[in-house]
Image: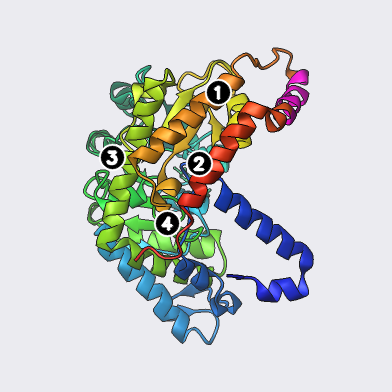
Amino acid sequence: MNLYTHIQKQDKETYKLLLAEEKRQAEGLELIPSENIVSQAVREAVGSCLTNKYSEGYPHARYYGGNEVIDQVEILARERAKKLFKVPYVNVQPYSGSPANFAVYLATCNPGDTVMGQLLTAGGHLTHGWKASATAMFYKAVQYGVKPDGYLDIKEIERLAKKHKPKLIWVGATAYVREFPFKELAKIADSVGAYLAADIAHIAGLVVAGAHASPVPYAHIVTTTTHKTLRGPRGGMIMVTKKGLAKDPELGQKVDRAIFPNLQGGPHDHTTAGIAVALKEAATPKFRTYGKQIVRNAKALAKDLMAEGVELVSGGTDNHMLLMKCGVGRGAIVEIALDAIGLTANKNTIPNEPSSPFYPSGVRLGTPSVTTRRMKEPEMKIIAHAIVRAMAVVEDEQLPTEKGERKAYLASVKKHAHANPALKKIHAEVRQLCKKFPIPDSFV
Ligand SMILES: Cc1ncc(COP(=O)(O)O)c(C=O)c1O
């Protein structure tokens, strides 16, 4: 089916690029844990006439006319999110996860206030106070880490919270394979009077499916992206919990003001419609089965990789992702080898990273997208075996200690990987697997 007939007629260059990307996605497997594949229904919403509209403000209080329908779309998305996550207040306007998080700072802190979050190199997100993020430029960020076993260091978090008395504590991460201890973090936040914000960008779909505990009883605010395990369009949401409203009855309005007019202008109404459609899909029994299968697949992939000798951070996973230890600074080399066999993954830091965030020592894998393609445990075994064989091909490659030589070295590894006969053979097997599990159109 050609979804791009108009683009084909009027813009050959863009048309060619879209077809190339469709092919890449169909003929390879996406193992990046923050990615997924949306339904055609979500794509239709995102490509709808709603992209033509300006609607600064909120339902029934807009700065532009003609928003009667848009109001209903936004209310529909909000109501569905409230019901699904069991929260009393939702803002569906954040352009993505990062602005959603920045709005939480604006709603709860003053510039210069102390905040706490998980260190980027220990799996945390940039927006939780990493030094290169605006969040650390405008707020005093204290960072916490994980223990050598990969679990959050609760005692250290408590010690830091008591010492620094932060106004806001983040729980949530971008590369953390264990269940988040929301209850323990809430105890710490409450003991110092801090807001607890749970960033469930990665695990939102698992929470909805009952495959991960919900932070809603424990946190004051919950943020999420809508495009990861939740399987919606690229966007974000901020939810205020009952506990949040009990701490500050004005918190919902403060969040709304933080998004507009503090941080953003007009909402992306086409995305809001896509979020509404995705939330309806996520409320189905099929989505519960999907979320649970994501975790079963991740656990199976972890077991199969370890059985073939791969070392994983924390020795396994509780959620949708795993972190392979690849040797000091070798994450990019393994990423290249996997790319050459049609598996897309990303290099990532590991706890106590011995190299650097740019040349890290791990590779992050995830199962949301392959589970959307309806793969199960037997396919995880095939993927694990392909990964192990690809890693073996590059096992003697070593990142140069001389920093200036690294870029050219990795370019040469890439060139050789794509011409390597052993990797080409595995790539053909991956293509066969993809053919057996085409990208589905619909999930309901
Ligand atoms: C935990 C977490 N929070 C926030 C974000 C930011 O989302 P976005 O990239 O949509 O701004 C991410 C994205 O990777 C994330 O993993």
Image side of residue 15 versus residue 200, left or right: right
What residue type is disc 3 on?
Gly
Q: Earlier in the sequence, mark 4 or mark 3?
A: 3
**Label 3: how many Cα within 10 Å (few below 14, some 14–19, many 20+):** some
Mark 3, secondary structure of its residue:
loop
Q: Specify the label residue 32 is tagged with.
A: 2
**Secondary structure mostly taken by the magenta-highlighted segment of the chain:** helix
What SS does tag 4 mark? loop
Q: What residue is shown at x 28% (from left), y 59% (from top)?
A: 286
> With respect to residue 431, does 287 lie above or below?
below
Residue type, numbered disc 2:
Ile
Cβ at disc 2 under 8 Å from ligand 1? no
Please name which of the two marks, 2 or 1, marks the residue nearer to the observer: 1
Sequence-first tag of 1 and 4:
4
Q: CA distance from mark 1 to mark 4?
A: 30 Å
Q: Residues within 10 Å of mark 4 (few under 14, many from 20)?
A: many
Badge 2 marks a residue whose secondary structure is loop
Q: Do callouts 4 and 3 mark residues in contact (Cβ within 8 Å)?
A: no
Residue in view at x 45 percent, y 84 percent? 69
Disc 4/disc 2 C-alpha distance (Å): 14 Å
Q: Give the label, 4 or 3, closer to the camera.
A: 4
Q: Amino acid at mark 4?
A: Arg
Residue 97 placement (x, y as % from top left) = 48, 51
